[in-house]
Image (cartoon, rainbow, N blue to C red):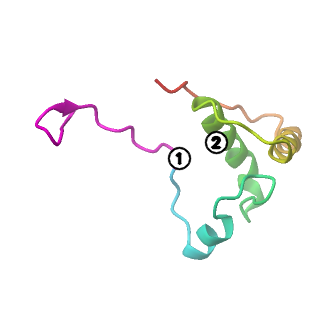
Amino acid sequence: MVGGAAGGVRERPEQPRHLIAVSAASNRSKSDKDPSEWLPSDGSYHCTYAATWVGTKLRWDLAVDENERQALLGLAEDCPTTTVVYEPAP
């Protein structure tokens, strides 16, 4: 709990779960692209990246467009042992 502007008390905002330190160039490269437009340059991280992406979409009940869906389905085929774990947002 933290103090509010008017002296009230409010819940502390949820801390990000999936922040990863990257170079400025990598951050600019990704920008706001989804997995149909961008994947990490390290191919060994694609499955983890896709699972984290899908978990975030499910957690917050976010929409997926068709290109993104197709890219994620392709990644899922390449990642048969990867499990998506998420907790629905409160």
The picture quadrant where one finds residue 42 is: bottom right
Residue type beneath disc 2 = Thr
What segment carries the magenta color? Answer: 1-18
Q: Is residue 6 magenta?
A: yes
Residue 10 colored in magenta in the image: yes
Image point (66%, 43%), residue name: 53
Q: Earlier in the sequence, mark 1 or mark 2?
A: 1
Q: Rate crowding at label 1 as few (under 14), some (14 to 19) or many (20 or more) other CA atoms within 10 Å.
A: few
Of residues 65 and 88, the one drawn nearer to the viewer in this rendering = 65
Mark 2 = which residue? 52
| Residue 41 visible in the displayed image | yes
Which residue, as the protein is rendered here, is positioned at the far front? 6
For label 2, the crowd category at 10 Å Cα-Cα, with few meaning under 14, some 14 to 19 and many 20 or more, is: some
Between 31 and 82, the residue placed more toward the observer is: 31
Q: Residue at 18% across / 39% down in the picture?
A: 4
Q: Position of residue 41 (x, y in %)?
A: 74, 65
Between 13 and 75, the one nearer to me in the picture = 13
| Mark 1 vs 2: CB contact within 8 A | yes
